[in-house]
Image: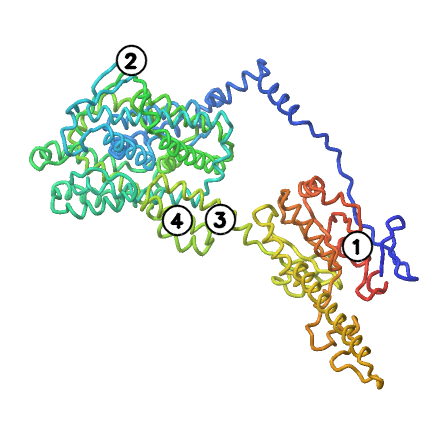
């Protein structure tokens, strides 16, 4: 039997001395790790140290406009910023009025929201291109909360009572002034409170430096969520397209409830609203397609929405659609600004959970768009600063009766394509909206709500087109397509906020499932090269005599330690636990046979058989005959494995926890008991450190091993240790 002489670095095998392969080693740098308390003190000292340079840097980082405005290239950038700002402002006028309808608010509050958010993001945002304002999904979420709180407060549904009638007993404490709100007043109070709470969440997340959470919201998750919410938005606007006066469905399955309600009331369709809706759709859909098709040739997109709004308002006013046909119109839109008011503090507990999901969606959309356009144009954005910016875009406007905002893809694309260079374009957009707020807003009194609903529905085209991409997504990646489908279906059919949660959970379980499904593959060596790859994937690879090389393609931790063992045993074709059990059973049978043979022999001698006749059925089986299966037809012992060493390639193992280290210890021990040595190779430094801390490399007994840097080094070392034939010819 070959034994290792650690001092001489040789293997002795009888009279032969085989040279032992010397493993390749690298000298590590000395790492002086500070204690945790020292690290905390150092970090706190760094954060609390105040100097002129630090104060200036903090101010410039917190208010990015102070950094880029002094460097503004007036001649190169001004024209593009002004043009993009004016065009986005023109587009925002009809969209702000329309999306107010989706949020359950009066039109003026949508204009307020777009105005204030444009100014605040221009001051605090780190992206040069995104347009922050009203976003359809957030309006839907806010509208759902508003309708719920209105119902809980005892207000009648939107269409079942005069909206300007005060409700008896509905008194709202607003700051220090006690007043009785009508339905519209209470609706914006709820919306502003939700917005304030969501903004607080976002600022707190910015303070806690949790901007990294955006990486956990994958593109497929966000796309599925937006598409599912778009279906809900589309369904919620159908009642306006048909001129039906129906309350908004609440609770889970609102989309199905709305469709049931629509189908039950089709007989009450307002023909004037229906014809107006169809006419506007026939104009806007082709117009949008023309804008998309010729966007490369157009200096700016043609604002067809504004033209439709103007034409529809004139037709409704002079045609008397409200008085003659009962069409719902936008109503009185005041000019100027209302005095600021505090949120309804007593409503915060009611809306806190809803506000958190709204804050998370708004932040995720904003950061995703910011990073996408920053990467496209070659600059960097700060996710935490984006959190601050969007948080203050919600907190400060909430005092002026605004609702939740975030970045919006459609307006951002328009902004970029029309020459935007900096957020100065957002200030120009705010000036356009200010002009509307001060002078033009009352002119939209006669605008039909069905026209606003058409604008919302037509702008959902991009999200709804994602359904045509499902086959391509499925071919590209089954997991991402499944996440998209599950998130979309849950958001649309069950509940919008629940859809986001389900999408996050499904994504997490998919990542976890990939580590659970990881397998171990046997590696072979390429000809005339020290390259080892998967034998099931490449041709022409060969195994090494007496050595099995296996790679496990996942981290090893508490959740997959048992799966790791099974995959490893399956890959090499030898389960040491089963092998040991088989040997114990065979040993037990051998002992029983020996005892029976001895007992039979003793009985024969006691009977006084003088002729010494052989004992029938009592032949003694020598132990060696058992090993080759030559005794009494009994089951033979399992054959010894055709390898004496197992090399485990740990390059895909990103990390090990204590359970993973324990699993490796058990595997090494089990294989050692059946005569197989386990060698680890290509471990990352962090994995090697985990092995050292977990005690894997501290054992100095018979099976003490080192971690090898290459697979070839481990194979040579294993072949130099021992040979299946017991000689030096094959092991040296």
Q: Residue furthest right?
A: 15
Q: Name the residue under label 4.
A: 486
Which quadrant: the C terminus?
bottom right
**SS at circle 3:** helix
**Which of disc 1 and disc 4 is earlier in sequence?**
4
**Mark 3 = which residue?**
510
Earlier sequence position, callout 4 versus callout 3: 4
At numbered mark 4, what does the secondary structure look like: helix, strand or loop?
helix
Tell me the number on the disc at residue 392.
none
Alpha carbon of mark 1 to alpha carbon of mark 2: how far? 82 Å
Percent x, y for residue 635?
68, 72
Which is more toward the observer, 566 or 432? 566
Q: What element carries label 2?
A: loop
Disc 2 target residue: 176
Residue 722, image x, y percentages: 81, 60
- Camera-side residue: 572 or 475? 572
The residue positioned 16% from the left and 23% from the top of the image is 168
Q: Residue furthest left?
A: 324
Q: Which of 531 and 427 is in front in this view?
A: 531
**Badge 4 local density, few (<14 within 10 Å), some, or many (20+)?**
some
């Amino acid at each position: 039997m070959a034994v290792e002489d650690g001092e001489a670095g040789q293997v002795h095998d009888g009279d032969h001395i085989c040279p032992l392969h010397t493993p390749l080693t690298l000298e590590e740098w000395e790492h002086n790790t500070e204690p945790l308390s020292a690290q905390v003190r150092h970090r706190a000292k760094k954060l609390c140290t105040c100097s002129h340079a630090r104060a200036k840097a903090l101010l410039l980082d917190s208010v990015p406009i102070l950094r880029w405005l002094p460097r503004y290239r007036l001649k190169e950038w001004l024209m593009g910023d002004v043009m993009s700002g004016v065009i986005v402002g023109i587009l925002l006028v009809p969209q702000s009025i329309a999306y107010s309808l989706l949020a359950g608010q009066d039109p003026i509050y949508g204009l307020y929201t777009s105005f204030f958010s444009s100014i605040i993001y221009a001051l605090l945002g780190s992206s040069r291109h995104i347009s922050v304002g009203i976003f359809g999904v957030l309006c839907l979420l806010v509208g759902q909360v508003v309708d719920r709180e209105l119902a809980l407060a005892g207000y009648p549904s939107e269409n079942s009572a005069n909206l300007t009638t005060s409700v008896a007993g509905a008194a709202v404490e607003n700051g220090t002034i006690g007043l009785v709100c009508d339905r519209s007043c209470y609706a914006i109070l709820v919306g502003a409170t939700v917005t304030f709470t969501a903004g607080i969440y976002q600022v707190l997340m910015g303070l806690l430096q949790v901007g990294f959470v955006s990486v956990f919201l994958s593109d497929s998750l966000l796309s599925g969520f937006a598409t599912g919410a778009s279906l809900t938005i589309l369904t919620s606007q159908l009642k306006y397209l048909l001129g039906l006066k129906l309350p908004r469905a609440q609770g889970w399955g609102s989309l199905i409830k709305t469709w049931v309600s629509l189908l039950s009331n089709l007989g009450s369709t307002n023909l004037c609203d229906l014809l107006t809706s169809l006419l506007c759709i026939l104009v806007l859909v082709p117009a949008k397609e023309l804008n998309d098709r010729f966007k490369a040739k157009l200096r700016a997109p043609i604002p067809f929405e504004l033209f439709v709004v103007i034409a529809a308002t004139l037709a409704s006013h002079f045609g008397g659609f409200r008085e003659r046909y009962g069409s719902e119109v936008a109503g009185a839109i005041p000019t100027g600004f209302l005095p600021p008011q505090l949120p309804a503090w007593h409503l915060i507990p009611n809306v806190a959970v809803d506000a958190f999901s709204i804050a998370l969606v708004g932040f995720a959309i904003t950061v995703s768009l910011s990073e996408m356009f920053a990467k496209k144009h070659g600059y960097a954005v700060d996710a935490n600063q984006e959190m601050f910016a969007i948080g203050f875009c919600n907190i400060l406007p909430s005092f002026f009766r605004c609702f939740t905002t975030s970045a919006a893809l459609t307006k951002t694309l328009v902004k970029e394509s029309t020459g935007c260079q900096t957020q100065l374009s957002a200030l120009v957009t705010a000036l356009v909206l200010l002009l509307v707020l001060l002078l033009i807003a009352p002119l939209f009194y006669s605008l039909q709500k069905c026209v606003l609903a058409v604008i919302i529905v037509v702008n959902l085209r991009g999200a709804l087109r994602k359904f045509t991409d499902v086959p391509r997504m499925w071919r590209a990646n089954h997991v991402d397509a499944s996440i998209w489908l599950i998130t979309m279906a849950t958001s649309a059919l069950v509940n919008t906020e629940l859809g986001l949660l389900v999408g996050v959970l499904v994504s997490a379980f998919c990542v976890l499932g990939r580590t659970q499904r990881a397998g171990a593959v046997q590696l072979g060596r390429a000809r005339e090269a020290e390259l080892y790859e998967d034998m099931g994937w490449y041709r022409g690879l060969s195994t090494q005599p007496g050595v099995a090389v296996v790679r496990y393609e996942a981290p090893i931790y508490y959740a997959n330690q048992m799966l790791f063992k099974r995959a490893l045993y399956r890959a090499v074709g030898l389960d040491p636990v089963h092998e040991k059990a088989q040997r114990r059973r065979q040993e037990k049978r051998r002992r029983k046979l020996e005892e029976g043979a001895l007992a039979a022999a003793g009985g024969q001698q006691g009977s006084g058989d003088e002729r010494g006749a052989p004992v029938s059925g009592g032949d003694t089986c020598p132990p060696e005959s058992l090993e080759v299966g030559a005794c009494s037809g009994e089951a033979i012992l399992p054959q010894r494995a055709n390898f004496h060493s197992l090399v485990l390639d740990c390059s895909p193992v990103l990390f090990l926890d204590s359970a993973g280290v324990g699993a490796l210890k058990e595997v090494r021990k089990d294989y050692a008991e059946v005569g197989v040595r386990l060698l680890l190779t290509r471990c990352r430094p962090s994995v090697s450190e985990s092995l050292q801390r977990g005690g894997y490399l501290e054992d100095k007994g018979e099976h003490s091993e080192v971690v090898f840097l290459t697979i070839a080094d481990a194979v040579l070392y294993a072949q130099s240790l021992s040979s299946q034939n017991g000689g030096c010819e094959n092991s040296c």
